[in-house]
Image: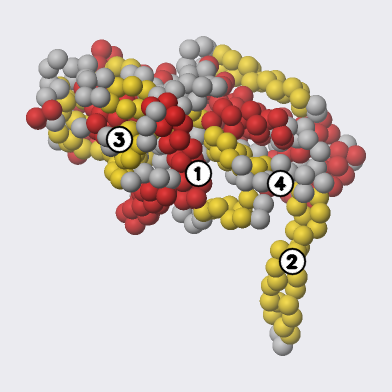
């Protein structure tokens, strides 16, 4: 039997499901997670190139890295040619590397597919392309799913955003990189479905009569929209689809930029540009780990001894050199999620030299992300306009993805289409369930 599954390779979380023609089965591919059917899209690679994914990756990372010792050694990195007037000479380039670093934790693997110019990263002595990282993650996901099902998986329907990029060339390149990664991961056949259309196929299972529906798929990496006719498979039609590169990770970054940077010295180091540059790198999950150099530590230590915002710079030093960035980002994301149900929450973190406490209200959050609302509303209304339907002709607006539960956007949908038309689906499983249905058919 040739088994085919649906895989939602998400920005923050992923999942695998299979459809038998009547029922969707979500596979528990991460037994260590609170929701075993949801696996974090994180990859941890050790110095000896052992790989871990999901909650196991997180736990192994914490065990190996947090508050560990560091030892930097000078390492030759290559040569450069230097030209000046009638002079020419070759100069050796050296970098400091931490020879005690046990591994690298990588997040947002899917986002890397969309980054123009980002080719990959060097992990210890090997270079890993974006496709290599996706291949490793998908191969491990495949093995876990096969273990659950007890048989080999030959084919997969992968979800993809409506737009990896505004550029058609880059969009196609990202899809083909993901296709090749899946093939190298061991799948014999790979096809794709737009994520909002997959969510629509899952929602359609609940319908007893045809309707015009908007799928509002707002996750960790992108907002994807589809306007469709659903309820009768013979007359199913996609009227229009659209998307924009705005989602949960942007909101996390905004919270850090607007509320958390003062805890690390922002506003008190403006006359010290090299320190200000470190502070302003805190929101960037890709840049922060690269700051842990002996030069930067020396700069911070001298500033602390000179009584330049010593408590805050000690916190910055602790964040960088005790590998606490992942913990910090998780605390910020958890606060954002809490504000979907509560009017206020606390962002707090205590570890060694960090004692961070910030009261954060829903009103502040909505104010901080207000500039995104206009962009979201514009792409939504543009997509509806291209469908040829008027807002009053929409029968249902189906929310999926974690960011779709943010009250500010729920209120926007109710204002545009009517409160009674806004419907919630399972934020973490509707896309993968729809991909399984597509794969099964």
Rounded to the nearest whole Å, what is the CA distance between mark 2 and mark 3? Answer: 50 Å
Residue at position x 56%, y 14% from top?
344
Q: Nearer the viewer, mark 1 or mark 2?
A: 1
Please state which of the two labelled residues, at mark 4 or mark 1, is closer to the viewer.
Answer: 1
Residue that mark 4 sits on = 291
**C-alpha gap between disc 2 and disc 4:** 18 Å
Residue at position x 45%, y 35% in the image: 143
State the mark number for residue 4: 3
Residue 95 picture quarter? bottom right
**Cα distance in 3D space between marks 4 and 1:** 26 Å
Badge 1 or badge 2: first in the primary sequence = 2
Q: CA distance from mark 4 to mark 3?
A: 43 Å
Instruction: Name the residue at 68% across, 76% down.
Output: 81
Between the residue at mark 3 and the residue at mark 1, the CA separation in whole angstroms equals: 19 Å
Nearer to us: label 2 or label 4: 2
Residue 11 is at least partly visible in this image: no
Instruction: Using the image as rendered, state which of residue 42 and residue 95 is in the foreground.
Output: 42
Secondary structure beneath label 3: strand
Q: Is residue 255 above or below residue 177?
A: above
Q: CA distance from mark 1 to mark 2?
A: 32 Å
The residue that label 2 is drawn on is 93
Say which mark, if any, is on residue 136.
1
- The crowd level at tag 3 (other Cα within 10 Å; few <14, some 14-19, many 20+) is many
Residue lying farthest to the right in this orientation? 305
């Amino acid at each position: 039997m040739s088994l085919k599954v649906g895989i939602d390779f998400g920005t923050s979380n992923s999942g695998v499901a299979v459809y038998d023609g009547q029922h969707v089965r979500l596979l528990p591919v991460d037994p260590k997670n609170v929701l075993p059917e949801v696996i974090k899209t994180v990859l941890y690679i050790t110095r000896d190139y052992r790989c871990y994914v999901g909650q196991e990756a997180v736990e192994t990372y914490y065990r190996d890295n947090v508050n560990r010792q560091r030892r930097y050694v000078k390492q030759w990195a290559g040569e450069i040619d230097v030209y000046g007037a009638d002079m020419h000479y070759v100069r050796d380039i050296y970098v400091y590397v931490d020879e005690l670093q046990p591994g690298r934790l990588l997040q947002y693997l899917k986002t890397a597919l969309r980054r123009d110019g980002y080719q990959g990263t060097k992990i210890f002595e090997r270079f890993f392309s974006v496709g290599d990282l996706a291949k490793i993650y998908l191969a491990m996901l495949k093995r876990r799913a096969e273990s659950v099902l007890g048989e080999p998986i030959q084919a997969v329907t992968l979800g993809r955003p409506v737009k990896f990029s505004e550029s058609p060339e880059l969009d196609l390149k990202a899809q083909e990189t993901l296709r090749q990664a899946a093939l190298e991961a061991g799948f014999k056949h790979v096809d794709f479905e737009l994520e909002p259309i997959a969510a629509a196929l899952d929602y359609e299972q609940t319908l007893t009569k045809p309707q015009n529906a908007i799928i509002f798929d707002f996750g960790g990496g992108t907002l994807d929209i589809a306007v469709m006719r659903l309820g009768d498979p013979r007359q199913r039609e996609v009227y229009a689809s659209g998307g924009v590169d705005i989602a949960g990770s942007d909101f996390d970054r905004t919270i850090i930029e607007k509320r958390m940077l003062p805890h690390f010295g922002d506003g008190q180091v403006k006359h010290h540009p090299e320190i200000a540059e470190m502070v302003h790198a805190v929101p960037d999950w890709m840049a922060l780990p690269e700051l842990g150099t002996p030069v930067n530590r020396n700069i911070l230590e001298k500033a602390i001894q000179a009584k330049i915002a010593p408590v805050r710079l000690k916190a910055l030093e602790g964040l960088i050199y005790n590998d606490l960035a992942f913990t910090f980002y998780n605390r910020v994301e958890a606060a954002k999620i809490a504000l979907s149900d509560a009017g206020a929450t606390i962002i707090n973190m205590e570890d060694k030299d960090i004692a961070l406490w910030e009261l954060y209200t829903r009103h502040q959050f909505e104010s901080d992300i207000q500039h995104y609302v206009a962009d979201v509303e514009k792409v939504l209304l543009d997509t509806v306009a291209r469908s040829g339907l008027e807002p009053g002709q929409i029968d249902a607006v189906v929310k999926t993805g974690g960011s779709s539960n943010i009250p500010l956007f729920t209120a926007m949908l109710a204002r545009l289409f009517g409160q009674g038309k806004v419907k919630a689906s399972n934020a973490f499983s509707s896309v993968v369930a729809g991909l399984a249905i597509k794969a099964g058919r």
